[in-house]
Image: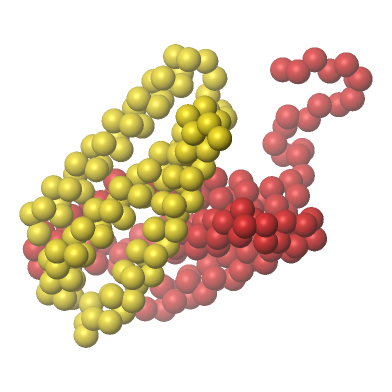
């Protein structure tokens, strides 16, 4: 805990910290990454099933007939797309593209909302199948 | 430039692996979209091609390296003290090696 010399309030309560849009993109990049790493064993299991036999292949497909699994799939695709888009944004920042404050904020806005929009589209697509 | 101490190597690994992951995913999506039908036969035949097996293993190694750099940053940000970090990072390396071996076994038997 840093020593508070000036007696200003120090808010470490996450609910009281208002992140800028670039911060929201950043924490989502991190959370989506951690989520995808945690789900990795399950994905390898699915790959194993899909290649074991004809029956197992369809067992893997049938798992996604359940509404809970459909929802998880939608979230996974959203997280993957957000992580990809935010990651490409970071690669561009490394190339000195869009580094100024206005561009950086605008691209973060676009990616956060584009992610939500894609999520809505994916929900519609997956549940209407 | 010091490649050992200042995180330059991790920085480069993260970006090179990211680009390879993106390229592989594009290849995967276009390949599967090109199937006459998404069934076991087409999928199994696609994975059986040696070049695709090599790409899948390379993809997974990139994915694990990418995951390792990312997760290590998260651990170093939120866990403090040598013991906690040592336990967490050792467990994560163990799980990642286990997943790498698992994937190799799956691909080899196809």
Q: Which chain is yellow?
A: B
> Please, is residue A98 above or below residue B106 in the view?
below
Q: From the image, which quarter does the N terminus of chain A lie in?
A: top right
Q: Is residue B13 left or right of residue A6?
A: left
Q: Which chain is red?
A: A
Q: Where's residue B87, x and y in %?
A: 39, 20
**What residue appears at the point 90 percent right and 20 percent down from the top-left corner?**
A7
Which residue is at the front of the view, A32 or B10? B10
> Please, is residue B80 above or below residue A20 in the view?
above
Q: Is residue A111 left or right of residue B55?
A: right
- Give the image's coloring scheme: by chain
Q: Is residue A99 left or right of residue B47?
A: right
> Please, is residue A112 above or below residue B36 in the view?
above
Q: From the image, which quarter does the C terminus of chain A lie in?
A: bottom left
Regarding residue A35, the answer to whether it shows in the image is no
**What residue appears at the point 11 percent right and 53 percent down from the top-left corner?**
B108
Q: Where's residue A112, x and y in %?
A: 64, 61
Q: Where's residue A38, x and y in %?
A: 39, 43
């Amino acid at each position: 805990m840093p020593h508070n010399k000036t007696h200003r309030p120090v808010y470490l309560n996450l609910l009281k910290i208002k992140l800028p849009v670039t911060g929201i993109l950043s924490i989502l990049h991190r959370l989506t990454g951690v989520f995808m790493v945690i789900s990795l064993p399950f994905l390898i299991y699915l790959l194993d099933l899909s290649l074991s036999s004809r029956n197992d292949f369809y067992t893997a497909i049938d798992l996604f007939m359940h509404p809970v699994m459909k929802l998880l799939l939608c979230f996974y695709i959203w997280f993957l797309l957000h992580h990809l888009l935010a990651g490409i944004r970071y690669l561009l920042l490394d190339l000195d593209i869009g580094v100024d404050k206005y561009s950086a904020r605008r691209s973060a806005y676009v990616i956060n909302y584009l992610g939500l929009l894609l999520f809505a589209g994916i929900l519609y697509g997956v549940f209407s199948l | 430039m010091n490649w050992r101490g200042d995180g330059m190597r991790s920085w480069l690994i993260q970006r090179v692996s990211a680009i390879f992951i993106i390229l592989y995913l594009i290849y995967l999506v276009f390949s599967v979209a090109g199937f006459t039908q998404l069934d076991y036969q087409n999928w199994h035949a696609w994975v059986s091609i040696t070049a695709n097996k090599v790409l899948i293993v390379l993809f997974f190694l990139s994915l694990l390296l990418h995951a390792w750099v990312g997760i290590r940053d998260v651990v170093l940000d939120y866990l403090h003290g040598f013991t906690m970090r040592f336990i967490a990072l050792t467990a994560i390396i163990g799980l990642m090696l286990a997943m790498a071996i698992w994937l190799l076994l799956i691909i080899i038997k196809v």
